[in-house]
Amino acid sequence: MPPTDRTTMNRRHLLTTAATLGAAAAALSLPLPAHAAATLRVGYIPIIPMTQLYVLMGEGWAKEAGLTLQTTSFQSGPAMIQGLASGTLDVAYVGIGPAMIARSKGVKLKVVAANVIDQVALIGRGPLSKAMAAAASPAEGFKAFRAAHGRPAKIGSLPAGSVPDTVLRYWMLEIAHIAADDIEIVGMGEQPLQQALLSGAVDGSSILEPTLTLVQSRLPDATIVAKAGTMFPRQPGAVLVVTEEAIARDRAAIAELVKLHIRATAFATANRDRTAELVTAAIGKGLVEQDVMRAALSSDATTLVDDPRVVLESTKQMQAFQQRLGQITDPVDVDALFDFSFHDAATGK
């Protein structure tokens, strides 16, 4: 090979090597993500108290933070707890009641954030609404209904152990003192319950948004007969629960999720129109109009929170009541159920 050709090849080699080294150096200089991309398997019930999840996913924040959230919808909290127990879920947006029951049965999980308080109200339709409006007290209203119809009022709720079911039973026994013979409680999933209300298969329901607002928008004779916050004052509602295994495997991913949850709480409170759009896209599925969803987000039954300390004491009160009902035979250490470290780190406490 002539010397001139050899010289040309050497120069090309040097230029190529320099370019490669430069690109490598530039890549190394780029900021690294806070943690490697992580996948979290998330269970949720398609109701408004899970608004934070819909916001952080709908706005694309999870993806931006390097989180892949594989979501699965469940009809009730107790069904979702089975997923946590079997190891098929890492995270659950679930009621505090099922979370306590799961912990009492040996499922290792932690409450790392709260979602909402005072989420459950009692809605009645038709004859029950009329009987309650004419009565001096709820107990008299249920008694009058039974006398007029020859049967107890049929009240639908989510399955036993769920927050709506527990709140209903607390209200019956501790607040309104409803005679056991004057009410029949029927447990079912959220979607079947909504249809049961609309069709008249039940006379009323202890339930959450958006069902409360949706039913009132479609049935002129449907009314709230016991407001949210009066059935179990400062009732703990939905919470963000994480398995201890997921925390041990990728604590950074859980920390990022809690940060996004807090951000979503503030966003949803300040941006009702956009939040209604996101929630409708996530759970409306053509069945709930966006204006109905916005009204539901603004109702008394939608008080979004994120600090888990807000529901600590009321959770202890709820557990004591569930023990009375026999739903929790082995009480849990509620303080140990909660892990404040993620929320504290995210808020600088």
Image (cartoon, rainbow, N blue to C red):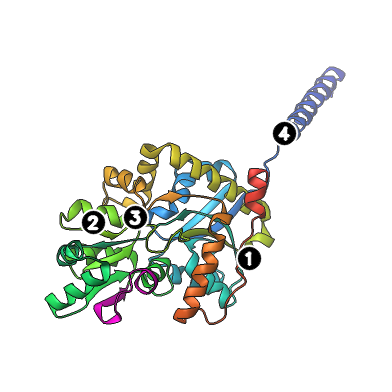
Tell me whether circle 4 and circle 3 mark residues in contact (CB < 8 Å): no
Q: Which residues are magenta?
A: 171-187
User: Label 3 to label 2, Cα distance in Å?
Assistant: 10 Å
User: Label 3 to label 1, Cα distance in Å?
Assistant: 29 Å
Farthest residue to the left: give it: 148
Tell me whether circle 2 and circle 1 mark residues in contact (CB < 8 Å): no
The crowd level at tag 1 (other Cα within 10 Å; few <14, some 14-19, many 20+) is: some
Residue type, label 2: Val
What's the residue at 50%, 56% (across, down)? Answer: 70
> 97 or 234: which is nearer to us?
234
Q: To which residue does mark 4 refer? A: 27
Q: Under tag 1, what secondary structure?
A: helix
Q: To which residue does mark 3 refer? A: 209
Q: Is residue 189 magenta?
A: no
User: Label 2 to label 4, Cα distance in Å?
Assistant: 56 Å
Mark 3 or mark 2: which comes first in sequence? Answer: 3
